[in-house]
Amino acid sequence: MSGVATMLQDKIMNARMAARAAALIFGAGLALPGLTMVASAAEQEHPPAQSWSFSGPFGRFNTAQLQRGFKIYREVCSNCHSLDRVAFRNLAEHGGLGFSEEQAKTIAAEYKIKDGPNDSGDMFERPGRLSDRFPSPFPNEEAARAANGGAHPPDMSTLAKARTYERGFPQFVFDIFTQYQEQGQDYIHALLGGYEEPPADVKAPKAGLHYNRYFPGHWIGMAKPISDGQVDYPDGTPTTVDQYGKDVAAFLTWAAEPHMMARKHLGAVVIFFLVVFAGLLYAVKKRVWHRWDTEHA
Amino acid sequence: MEGHSVYKPKSGVARWFEDRLPIVGLVHSSAIAYPVPRNLNYFWTFGGILSVMLVAQIVTGIVLAMHYVPSADLAFGSVEKIMRDVNYGWLLRYLHANGASMFFIAVYIHIFRGLYYGSYQAPREVIWILGVIILLLMMATAFMGYVLPWGQMSFWGATVITNLFSAIPVVGSSIVTWLWGGFSVGDPTLNRFFALHYLLPFMIAGVVGLHIWALHHVGQNNPTGVDVKDIRKDTVPFSPYATLKDGFALVCFFIMFAWFVFYTPNFLGHADNYTEANPLVTPAHIVPEWYFLPFYAILRAIPSKLGGVLAMFSAIAVLLVLPWLDGSRVRSCNYRPIYRIFLVIFAVDCVMLGWLGSKPPEGWYIPISRLATFWYFFHLLLILPVVSRIETPRPLPASIAESVLKRVKTRPGEPGLAPPAPGAA
């Protein structure tokens, strides 16, 4: 048994060294077309587009949905994933989850935050405050990898904006006008429901990987994180993986872009102003030029 | 240009000041009385749009710099702090990031306008050369700016582009080490890129000053390419005529800008740049910002590293001698029917190169990239010099005024053929 394990480890080590070498070759041998795509993008299946309450120029977050997504984060995701850039005070901010300051304080107090050093030079734990950020499940990346079979669960603060899939021509041109920008959300939703049995002839490249239809290259380090009925919804919303995926993707959108509603609101005001201003300018310009043309015809 | 120093100070104080520093007179002569050909179309509004964009980028950039931390450990976090905790920080950052793209959209239109109407020809060669220098400075500024958020694309883009200098024989790798300030892209690289990213826009502003100075010395070209003959008949004063027209175009441009900033702020960026830089993980697909893609395609089309780098820099350097490659006596492509077709093909070729730059260099993309690269240089180095010297241009209008009055009287596109409309003066 141990011989097999060592062999596997050697293989992984070789793969890592190859990846690093590929990175160096990429940098150095850029102009050699044969070498440039050593780290070639794996084939990726397009996730099906969902309808999101926050899409489009007048889209708004659904407060209840964000709270459900937050519940999933707390009960499931946060066991492995950090949310480093989000603070407890954000939970009570306008255009977000809609918690009151008291509720946010209560939530914060449920977390233990490491603080210090105190007057005697010792670190200590205390209940969280509004100004604290969500604590990480692991003290460092190495600890996270050790607990997750070598994989590092990414921080979730910007995840919704950091994931995408290629739209291709001409779709990417239409996206400017339809304002479609939920590639990350569609991908996260599809990924959570995309765990399935690998095709019979496909073998995992190494132990501890899981087959997912939508993950680039299909073999993902994360085990199926959530199943039907796993998180309880007191408001009667269906407790399906499909619904969980939508809710958690909505929550991650807010986490990545907490000022989205302010942005869209200001956008409507700015564009309305600019259109009216452009109309007035055009009318004045027309009139002034017409006067010149008639005088100098 | 004569005839536009007409500023007369009205009050005693103004006269006293004007005798000592004639700056009000300078502004008056260059922004109010300055004569503008009366037949300019909306392609001529992009110079003004670019000036405003430069100022907008500097203003948003200075405020962002007050919150940004140029350190490999803290840069990504400081940008996220700007997005989350700084009042309207999200607006400043999206304005600045999308503003760079808007700047390039405007500059590429501005350049193509110059190509189409022969604005680089005598006596405007120096304006054109200064413009090419501005383009180079803009590219350097934009490249270094994209490194600052210290995401994956920042880091790997910087690695790939700085590595280009290793193609220089003998001293290449020493130069790369010197550029990096170490043996890989890291803290010293980020710090110097930040310093230069702050400096270069002011150098651009300086060259823009020369660009406008030279322009106001020789006067603007116009869609006919015919010189101004009679200031009273052929031109209008800059204010209010050009100011209003430029203002209207600027506000329309801002509507597009606002659309991106407020509704699809990350469309022009790359998702990988929302993942913090990691020297151990290479992104599957390293792509530069869209405005570099044509040059990136040329770089990769040549099957030799040094050759690719030389071709990429030549693609811009060749523009410097454009005024002498064009041998036509006529400026505007409106009167050069054969060359006009080639110029449209050239524009399509540039867009093709941009598309190819976004594709991986494999399969059919390689021969198509080589063909498109070949055509880029073939057009500039052979088609332009030859066609411009053998083509017989269509007859030019006698004056700007005549071309405008003809257009008023006749249908557009059929100059002088249709009978005068009833009641036309």
Image (cartoon, coloured by chain):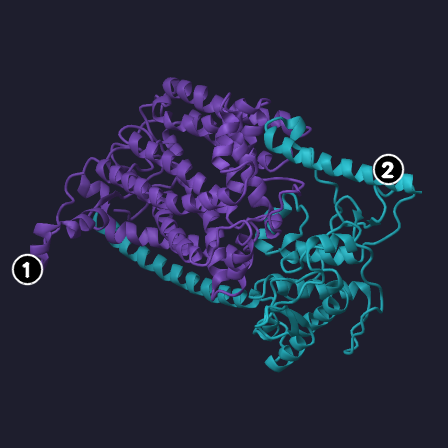
> Depth check: A1 or B77 in front?
A1
Q: Colour of chain B?
A: purple
Percent of width and height locating residue A77 = 74, 63
- The residue indicated by pointer 1 is B12
User: Residue A259: where, in percent of width, then height?
Assistant: 55, 66
Which residue appears farthest toward the right when viewing the image? Answer: A1
The answer for how far apart the CA atoms under marks 1 and 2 are is 94 Å
Q: Secondary structure at mark 1?
A: helix
Q: Residues within 10 Å of mark 1 (few under 14, many from 20)?
A: few
Height in image: B267 above or below B165?
A: below
Displayed quadrant of residue B135: top left
What's the residue at 39%, 55% (across, down)?
B62
- The chain letter under disc 2 is A
Pointer 1 with pointer 2, Cβ within 8 A: no
Q: Which amino acid does the dot numbered 2 rest on?
A: Met
In which quadrant of the rendered view does residue A80 lie?
bottom right
Left/right of residue A205 with respect to residue B301 in the rendered view: right
Dot 2 falls on a residue whose secondary structure is helix
Residue at image mark 2: A7
> Which chain does the numbered disc 1 sit on?
B
Residue found at x 67% / y 76%:
A107
Instruction: Tell me, yes or no, if residue B215 can be seen here.
Output: yes
